Image (spheres, rainbow, N blue to C red):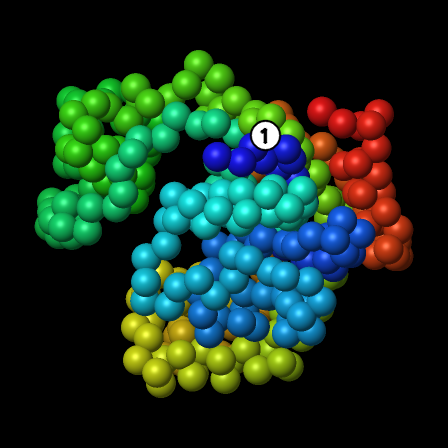
Amino acid sequence: MTDIPHRWAIAGPTAVGKTAVGIAVAQRLGSACISADAVAVYRALNIGSAKPTPEEQESIPWYGIDLVNPTDDFTVQDFTSHTEGVLTEYATRGLTPLIVGGTGLYIRPILATLSIPPVGPQPELRAAWSEEAAIHGTALLHERLQKVDPESAERMPPADLKRIMRALEVYAVTGKPMSSWRTPEGVHGIPKPGARLIVMERDMAELDVRINARVQQMMSDGFLAEVEGLLAAGIPPDAKAMLSLGYRHLVEYLTGKRGYDATVDAIAQDTRRFARRQRTWFRGDPMTEWLTIDAGEAVADTAERVFRLLTEPSSSK
């Protein structure tokens, strides 16, 4: 197997400017970008996912986009397999694609060796547990988890059905509690050779303004029509893809749960909250190298700083 000399990621909260900078750096490297965005993997979810525009996708090769249909399941393991294939292919040509995005859960296993249970989703088990929780309450499943994996149960609120079911299915398939898969290094794992994580950030007040402007632009670009088209094409409103930020809000608007202006405000507000959660995620990762972007700083200037961080010998890791 070809060794991968570099694993370089440009990350950060939504609307911070990752895509434009990633393209500029990839062009300097003569390489490509791999989108690390949990919504961009779905075909036909274009505007609300803030995918690179057709022009941006033509400027350099892009991967990690339009991989599955909106009704398909897509896991972290799926993204990891796709990305490792791209990295290996480019390594044979002596090139390093840039991983660009804000989904830290996708980026982490590319940059670090984790102890992850080799268990995919178990639809039948999850359906049975979901029905049981609906009848008897989630606390019953939490009590069951306490008996087989008390360490995991202690870290999970009794109402967190999704995480409880994940821990139960790991035990059901492997016979080992999920907590036993945790490494001494913790959830961040051990950095892989050549791994770098550059996280862009801006003043939060400025980022809020950028987010508000982005939401308005999405609406002007036809975000509502995109959602109407997905529903008309038979995509269920409760499909995983349709529960994404913005999409679920517009589904609620179309079903009369709130008015148009209130819906747009809710999208902007929840996107601002999401950006703060993204920052918190990356602040918890010891690999993070922060790059503060000043208001008005040109994309070319930011890209030059990132390029130097990644390529100058004095900065190599």
Q: Residue at x 14, y 50 (%)?
A: 124
Look at the image and tell me whether residue 128 can be seen: yes
Position of residue 290 measured from the top left corner of the image (x, y, whole percent): 74, 35
Q: Is residue 25 left or right of residue 119?
A: right
Look at the image and tell me whether residue 154 can be seen: no
Q: Nearer the viewer, residue 206 or 47?
A: 47
Position of residue 189 measured from the top left corner of the image (x, y, whole percent): 49, 24
Query: Furthest-top residue in view?
Result: 184
Q: Residue at x 40, y 79 (%)?
A: 230
Q: Residue at x 33, y 75 (%)?
A: 235
Crowd tier of the residue under label 1, counting other residues whose Cα lies within 10 Å: few below 14, some 14–19, many 20 or above: some
Q: Nearer the viewer, residue 216 or 113?
A: 113
Q: Amino acid at mark 1?
A: Asp
Quick one: quadrant of the C terminus? top right
Q: Is residue 138 left or right of residue 83?
A: left
Q: Quadrant of residue 237?
A: bottom left
Q: Mark 1 highlights which residue?
A: 285
Q: Residue at x 57, y 25 (%)?
A: 191
